[in-house]
Image (tube, helix red, strand yellow):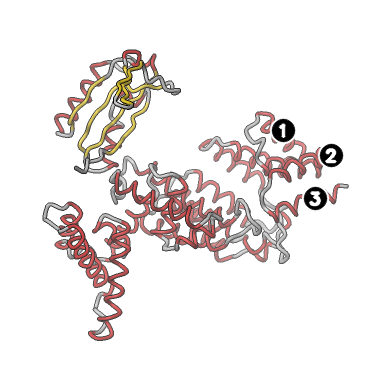
Amino acid sequence: MLATLIRLLGDFDVAEEALHDAFKAALEQWPREGVPSNPRAWLVSAGRFKAIDGLRRQKRFTPLDEAGAAAETAVEDSAAFADPESVEDDRLRLIFTCCHPVLTADAQVALTLREVCGLTTEEIARAFLTPAPTLAQRIVRAKNKIRDARIPYEVPSPAELPERLDAVLRVIYLVFNEGYAASSGSTVTRHDLSGEAIRLGRVLVDLLPEPEAVGLLALMLLQDSRRAARMSPEGEVILLEDQDRSLWNQEQIQEGQRLVERALGSRRAGPYSIQAAIGAVHAGSPDAASTDWAEIVGLYDVLWHVDRSPVIELNRAVAIAMRDGPAAGVALVDAILERGDLRDYRLAHAARAELCRRLGKNADARQSYQKALALTRQEPERRFLQRRLAQLS
Amino acid sequence: MKYLCLVYLEGQKLHAVPDRECQNCGDGFRERGVLLAAEALQPIETAATVRVRDGKISVTDGPFAETKEQLAGFYLLDARDLNDAIQMAAKIPPAREGSVEVRPVRELVP
């Protein structure tokens, strides 16, 4: 309903206030006159009239007034807001507006969580460990930019769609990761944000079943399926190969695997779908030793082809270590570190340390664990690295 | 709504795009009825910067900012919204060589 009102009224704040007024009116009228046959349409309609009333009072409305005129035109468009399909279209338009590339990444995330997911400013601020006034200001600035630069509420044309969809997927995955592997703070998982991202991913797949949207939803489900196994009851990190796989969520795994097949079957699979396919291989393996590491290395080769990021190169090196032994992995990780791309990336040092430990090169392992320790900002990760260091001495 | 598309190019690329191409681009906008004004500019070495402080005029050369790119021209366009303006800006030929800044015009409040 908020999405529809934003489209009809062309302004976030006016729409929010209108919806609030509409609920107030419903509380007064519905007990007296009964619930209308289409409550959603009633609320949107009431909200719109309240808003136009407000604009008239505020601005001494004349037909020349732009916002008022736009709202007035919308009044005639009475079928549009009663139709559930158009309500969903409004939601999709809103997602694309909130993730518009002219907004900063921070603003895209905050605005999407606020306007599309309906989280309060305080909830978002808490989840991102940002002071609430800072976050509120970020949202206000983004809304002002949408209004002043006139960013439209529309689903991009087919020509623009790939790039614009990338921005939307990036925002959703960022929210998921913030919940899954918080970049700082005392707990590794902040489930609410991951759940919110998965919900948003589902909405997107329903509205716009593009292969990469399907792939991203699969990726999130497959990662999230391991949630219960990746931490001990004491809050300690458990690596993938040491996890109790009976704790993995089979329902999420099955849904994830179905979605991976659907995304790959489109023949237009991109990085999210390929990463999801890697997740699906892990999910289908009873333990680390019987995992088809050759398959995983092959998928990383494909992934490296579409996205030449050093982090993917690192993950590929680890997969090769699992296939060919730790010595092959150390050589590749050292080559990446020597180039300097990942010198400040804690997981590159942690991976090297782990591989050196397996080779019995304790001095090298110790040095790399210490580098990783200096770079990590997560408390459980810090404890994990300290435990490893203690085991070496 | 009006948008000013500011074309930025590095000094040595000011003539990288043939004038004819820019002319054609402008003609295309004019035929669609979206062009309000467009001009190419002389290089930044020809610029004067004027300030008035305490009623006194001061004139200096340049702005000579730190950036290598300089303002090379502009198109003032009438677009439906920002997405429309971005689509049009992408058609400006020097966008291939430098960059185009898209700025919404603010109506003065008298």
Q: Nearer the viewer, residue A197 or A326?
A: A197
Front disc: 2 or 3: 3
Earlier residue among tags 1 and 2: 1
* Residue under label 3: A388
Rendered image: mark on residue B106 = none
- Residue most extreme to the bottom: A32
**Above or below, A339 relative to A64:** above
Tell me which corner region of the image, top left, top right, bottom left or bottom right, holds residue A366.
top right
Give how far across and how far down residue A76 sits, in percent: 14, 62
Residue ID at (38%, 52%)? A140
The location of residue A38, given as percent across then percent down, is 25, 75
Q: CA distance from mark 1 to mark 2?
A: 14 Å
Mark 2 or mark 3, earlier in chain: 2
Instruction: Give the x, y percent position of residue A116.
Output: 39, 59
Q: Residue at x 43, y 45 (%)?
A: A167
> Cβ–Cβ below 8 Å for labels 1 and 2?
no
Mark 3, Cα crowd under 10 Å, few <14 / some 14-19 / many 20+, is some
Which residue is identified by label 2?
A361
Vertical position of residue B71 compared to residue A226: above or below:
above
Q: Residue at x 79, y 39 (%)?
A: A367
What label sits on residue A334 in the rendered view? 1
Q: Nearer the viewer, residue A273 or B19?
A: B19
User: Viewed as shown, does residue A340 lie left or right of A365?
Assistant: left
> On the picture, is A50 further left or further right than A209?
left
Amino acid on which disc 1 is placed: Asp
Q: Is residue A324 above or below residue B46?
A: below
Residue A283: x %, y % from top left: 61, 57
**Element on which disc 3 rests:** helix
Give the amino acid at mark 2.
Answer: Lys
Q: CA distance from mark 1 to mark 3?
A: 20 Å
Secondary structure beneath disc 2?
A: loop
Disc 2 from disc 3: Cα separation: 14 Å
